[in-house]
Image (tube, rainbow, N blue to C red):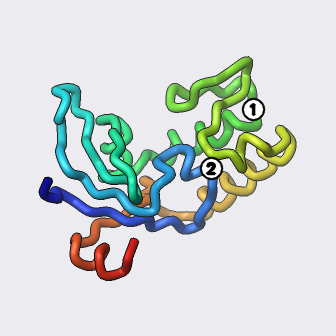
Amino acid sequence: MSTILSLVRNATPHNALFDEHFAPYQSITVLACNYDGNGTALCRGDDQLVEISKANLRRILFGAERGKVEAYLTSIFDPETEVEESSPRQGEPLFRQPELQAMKKYDLANLAKQTLKELRAQPAPRLLYYRQVDICSVERQGV
């Protein structure tokens, strides 16, 4: 299968909470767009074959609106803030990553507050978490 687009993580500041919001992969290679008729992309996320929804692919390619990322981070420590991107379980967001699942609620709240502070210090209106690269450079770097 041929490559349509290759991306690598461009995270500054790198943070596990951003991995939760976007995608947990260091590199993403888009192999097929809209392969299921619903806009889902078939991709290679690091070394595994994965599906990325149309909404997540848009966020990855065009960046996420700063306000939506701020709302996501706020929802971690403020139970009255709800975001459609996070799936609450009895008032708490679900996390994919084991290191976040193992953290205490207080530590997660502090991490979210620190990440929000760093995000607000950035001047860009959209948060770009990945950048495009060509497939040759990805293969040479062993990413």
22 vs 137: above or below: above
Can you give x and y, in whole percent of width and height, for residue 11 in the image? 51, 65
Q: Residue at x 31, y 73 (%)?
A: 138
Q: Please, what is the three-letter code of the amino acid marked with disc 1?
A: Asp
Mark 2 residue crowding within 10 angstroms, few (<14) / some (14–19) / many (20+):
many
Can you give x and y, in whole percent of width and height, for residue 89 in the image? 68, 21
Which residue is most to the top? 90
Q: Which quarter of the rendering shows the C terminus?
A: bottom left
Label 1 or label 2, whichever lies nearer to me, is: 2
96 vs 140: above or below: above
98 vs 28: above or below: above
Q: Residue at x 73, y 18 (%)?
A: 90
User: Count the marks: how many?
Assistant: 2
Disc with the residue nearer the chain's start (1 vs 2): 2
Q: Secondary structure at mark 1?
A: loop
Left or right side of 23 for 98: right
Residue bearing the label numbered 2? 17
Residue 56 found in image quarter? top left
Can you give x and y, in whole percent of width and height, for residue 2 in the image? 13, 57
Q: Residue at x 29, y 66 (%)?
A: 132
Residue bearing the label numbered 1? 78
Residue 134 found in image quarter? bottom left
